[in-house]
Image: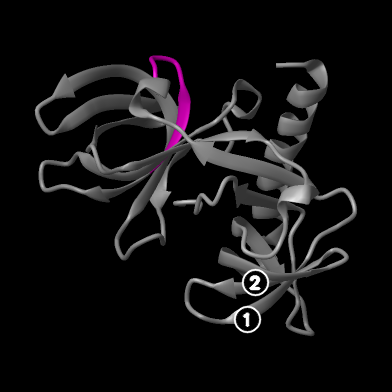
Amino acid sequence: MSRITRWAFGAAALGLVFVTTAALAQERVRVRGTIENVDGNVLTVKTREGQDVKVKLPDNARVLGLEKASIDDIKQGTYVGVSAMPQTDGSQKALHVHIFPDAMRGVAEGFGPWDVRPNSTMTNATVDNMVTGTDGRNITVKYKDGEKKILVPPDAAIVKYVPGNKDALKAGAKIFIVAAVKQPDGMLEAPNVSVGLNGLTPPM
């Protein structure tokens, strides 16, 4: 990965953390949906809930691409994010896995609730080991405060972050914004956006 690419990913990662921290006193929303129109720096998005929202991006907005990956792309030492459902034995069953580049290692590290489904969780952590089982791949991930055992079944969506640019933000593209800040006029503002490439829907 080039120095410029590392800088871009690193800046995007810092932006994600900054938004999460700075917006604590403001109403934050996650945006999952399809771009319907692009007018300059303003995206009109049809959310997965069926609402039309407008999202304003700054001139220096960080755009991260997401493309399809496979279970073989997950290796020991890989930094991943996993949305999952808790199991009765204390483990997690993955709904999806997204693979971070090295420049984003450590972003949002930890375990907590998530909203991709009711009662779902998110773990951002480093893969410690992997074992192939009859019902999928069992991985152990470690983060600064602990570890989780996660089953990645064959039907779990697996994607990876790649460099992106504003050219990918066009009508029909599927996007995910982790923390858009709602403004008094109802407009949303976000310095970062993840966009699915080649028709991919971000599974987060």
Q: Magenta part of the protein: which range? A: 75-82
Task: Give amino acid for label 2.
Answer: Val
Does the magenta segment cover residue 112?
no
Residue at 78% across, 83% down: 184
Residue 108 in view (yes/no): no
Relative to 130, is 61 on the left or the right?
right
Q: Which residue is mark 1?
A: 52
Residue name at image x 40 percent, y 60 percent = 116
Is there any visible trace of residue 152 in the rendered image?
yes
Sequence-first disc among 2 and 1: 2
Name the mark on residue 45.
Answer: 2
Quarter of the figure with the N terminus:
top right
Give the CA distance from mark 2 to mark 1: 6 Å
Residue in the image at 63% along x and 49% along y: 194
Q: Is residue 166 above or below residue 52?
A: above
Q: Position of residue 72 (x, y in %)?
A: 36, 21
Check contact, mark 2 vs mark 1: CB within 8 A.
yes
